[in-house]
Every structure is written in structure tokens, then in C-alpha cells.
Image (tube, rainbow, N blue to C red):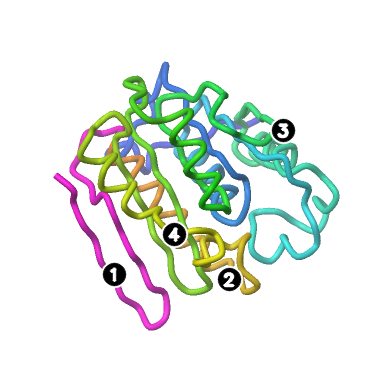
Amino acid sequence: MSELDLTRHMEVFDPAKTIGMRIDVIGDGAVGSRIVRELARLGVQDIHVWDFDIIEAHNVPNQDFGLGDIGQKKVDASAERILRDQGLKITTHDERVDGSQPMGNFVFLAVDKMRARKEIFDKGLIFRPHIRGVCELRMGPVSGRIYTFVPSRPSHISAWQKTISYTDEEAQVSACGSTTTVGATAGLIAVLAVWKFIAVMTEKPYDNYVLVQANPSSFYSEQWD
């Protein structure tokens, strides 16, 4: 099997910077499945993917799966395609994350319920000094929100917690929670999320909050400290 030739992006991101680090993607859906793909393309080695769902026909247009994957576990399909296309083995977890599971050094939180976000953060992420960053994603049909923060920094904790004061019933929180889903929107959010990961890993400045609107196009960002 041929190996990935990473020379084109090495000046921007050298995956050697993540040696010894574990990257977790919680939620292998519209955004999460694309994040897994982009991390593999960067050459990140220790990727853990968490999801307990099975691929259905309506997932194919908006997630990084194909018609041949229908009926398969999402994490299994992701592992197969990453091994086939990028030659990398990822670690899969066919289970619901509730915060009791140990996480690695960077966490992408791409679940579809506000209560799940709160539970995972409160039980498994807050004040964990080994976690260099959390990137939490929210998606609507034509817009997305990307929150990137350090879960052991009090100012970041306070700022992020102010954004989760509403319930699942009060907001359309993700592709999985809405009746309308656009794959191109998920791709936009996933790419921005991976760029936040690159910034954290390369110790570059980054926006803690990004609101992106696909059509009509607009972009808003904030830094918390």
C-alpha cells in the first residue's frame, strides 16, 4: 500500500507535532465523519472515533459515507474508508459517550443534543489539564457555530457555558437534530474545525467562537482572552 505524501502541507502542519497525542472525535455524523477524514489526510496518527449509530439511506447525502455503507456501524465504515484511502488505522468506539470515558489531548465534540454536550463536558472534559483543546460544533441547514477552547481555563469555561443555556427543544443544534441538512454546510464547519485544531497544535492564535453563514455568506468571530 502506498503511503501518504504529506509534503504539500508540511510547512503549515507537520503531523509529527501530534506524536504521542490522542485526538478524539465524539460523533461520527455529518460534521464528525468529515473531521475524521481531514485529520487522516493531515497524517494524524492516533485518532479515536466515538459513535453508536448505524448508517441509514438518509445519511449518505450529508455524511462522509456511501451507498455501500448503509446498514453498517458508522465507526466501522469510517475505519474502513480511512484505512483504504489514507492507509491509517483509527481506533473506534461503538458506544454512547457520557463523560465517563477517558479522552485524549484534543477533543472534537460533534454530538447532536445540548444535554449530551453538557453531560460530556461536566463529567469528562472540564478541568482536565491534559486536554489542550476542545472544539465543539453546532450546525443548522445553512450556518454553523465553532467553539474552540481550553477546558481547564476558567475564562474559557465561563464563556462556553454561557452558550449552552438553552435546551434541545429551544434550538436546532445540529444536522442530526434538524429536518433539513445540507452536506456542504457540514463540510464548511468540519474544515473550520480542523483549522482550529491546526492552530492549537502549532500554538498559533485562534478564534474561540466562529459563526459562519453559508448563504448569504457572512462570518463573525470572537476571542475570549
Q: Where is residue 84 in the image (x, y as percent from the top left)?
A: 69, 38
**Crowding near the residue tagged with mark 1, few <14, some 14–19, many ≥20 C-alpha atoms within 10 Å:** few
Q: Disc number at residue 182? A: 2
> Is residue 205 found left or right of 84 in the rendered image?
left
Q: Going from the N terminus, do you reach mark 1 or mark 4 first?
A: 4
Give the amino acid at mark 3: Asp
Task: State the CA–CA distance, disc 2 to disc 1.
Answer: 18 Å
Question: Is residue 88 within the magenta segment?
Answer: no
Q: In this view, does 76 lie above or below 141?
A: above
Among the two numbered marks 3 and 4 on one chain, the one whose residue lies closer to the N terminus = 3
Q: Which segment did they paint magenta? A: 201-225
Residue flagged by tag 1: what amino acid is it?
Phe
Point out which mark residue 219 bears. 1
Q: Quadrant of the C terminus?
A: top left
- Nearest to N terminus: mark 2 or mark 1: 2
Quadrant in which residue 50 is drawn: top right
The answer for how far apart the CA atoms under marks 3 and 4 are is: 28 Å
Separation of disc 4 and disc 2 at Cα? Answer: 24 Å
Q: Determine whether label 4 and label 2 are within 8 Å by CB.
A: no
Residue in the image at 56% along x and 39% along y: 26
Comes first in the chain, label 4 or label 2? 4
Q: How crowded is mark 2: few (under 14 residues within 10 Å), some or many (20 or more)?
A: some
Q: Which of marks 3 and 2 is nearer the N terminus?
A: 3
Residue designated by label 3: 94
> What kind of residue is marked 4?
Tyr
